[in-house]
Image: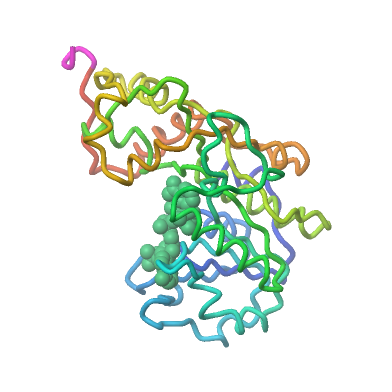
Amino acid sequence: MLPDLVNRSTPLPRNARLLVLGAGYSGRCLARLARSHGTPVLCTRRSLDRPDADLVFDSSEGLLPDSGALKEVTHLLSTIPPDQDGSDPVLSTLLPTLKRMPLQWVGYLSTTGVYGDRNGEWVSEDDTPDPILERSRRRLDCEHSWQASGLPVQILRLPGIYGPGRSVLNGLRQGSARLIEKPGQVFCRIHVEDIAGACWHLIKRSAEGQRPAVVNVVDDCPAATADLLRYAAGLLGCSPPEAMQFDAIQSTMSAMAQSFWSENRRVSNRLLTGDLGYNLLHPDYRAGLKDCLNQDSVTDHDLQTPVPRSASG
Ligand SMILES: NC(=O)c1ccc[n+]([C@@H]2O[C@H](COP(=O)([O-])OP(=O)(O)OC[C@H]3O[C@@H](n4cnc5c(N)ncnc54)[C@H](OP(=O)(O)O)[C@@H]3O)[C@@H](O)[C@H]2O)c1
């Protein structure tokens, strides 16, 4: 939970000012951590109606934040995905403004999809990216643009993000979860609080002179989604959905879902947790899902209650 994250980290220097470009699921979590430490934060969203929106930024509508409001910003996180044409929405509209800011650290949230398919083998930052999917190629183009920007950029490569309100528990509660078996297939994941915790840690390491260009932010435990669903069902006290074989249902899956299942890799976090010394708050899906269960029960009152084990056979 966020208090745990706050307790195990220390504040930034008093002059630090954080800007979160794209305060969605991950961006808002970092903003909460920073505010808990007393660091002033500015968050952009595409509409001021959205939670935590301090400034409007929507590159596709040409709505840009006022550069005067950003002039004291020292730390920046961009969570905004690539445009359809592969350009980065931030760099194509705000780079001159960013260059005038006293930036000490710039985090860019990318994806482990840039590694492509590795047939279930381990992959690290030392391996050359080999994206297969078009969206991952666009992402790699954006990574290159950020690295060429002249800003103090660090690329954070993320696997599937989960956390409170966004985990397999939700699918089970809503009855929409499908338990799909594909022998040998694993997925990597990261709890949203560990994205915030890793950003904070990387900011500190960077100030001490340690800023690797690319860092994988993943937990310790690549695992099959079927294992997660069975574990989550146990937490909820309900039966897991009936198992389906991937080969039998592949043709019924959406193109997006099929693309997720077309790649198989184990992404190493040795750089983050070994060399850079970050301690994961949720090292595996078991710890992470228990946390989601606790936090969901506090915040997500509109979710359906789970089917009791006895009632579902
Ligand atoms: N979800 C995953 O499992 C996963 C896995 C790997 C990598 N990633 C990537 O990691 C990043 C963070 O993920 P997330 O789930 O936290 O993302 P998210 O909740 O969707 O937040 C993305 C943010 O980008 C903003 N945004 C989108 N298009 C924009 C534009 N054209 N101009 C200005 N702002 C724009 C959104 O604005 P609003 O707040 O107004 O919506 C939102 O604040 C994303 O780039 C995502 O693609 C995600």
Nearest the eye: 275 or 11: 275
Rendered location of residue 255, percent (x, y): 30, 45
User: Which SS type dominates the magenta stretch?
Assistant: helix
Q: Quadrant of ligand 1?
A: bottom left
In magenta segment, residue 124: no
Horizontal side of 105 relative to 310 (left or right) equals right
Rendered location of residue 229, percent (x, y): 36, 25
Rendered location of residue 265, percent (x, y): 54, 34
Horizontal side of 196 relative to 292 (left or right) equals right
26, above or below 235, in the image: below
Nearest the eye: 67 or 140: 140
* Residue depicted at 58% across the width and 31% down the height: 283
Snapshot quadrant of residue 124 = top right
Q: Give the range drawn in magenta.
A: 309-313
Quadrant that contains the C terminus: top left
- Report whether residue 52 is seen: no
Colour convention of the picture: rainbow
Report the number of discs: 0
Rendered location of residue 111, percent (x, y): 53, 50
- In this view, the residue farthest toward the left is 311
* Residue depicted at 34% across the width and 33% down the height: 169
60, above or below 241, in the image: below
Nearest the eye: 10 or 184: 184
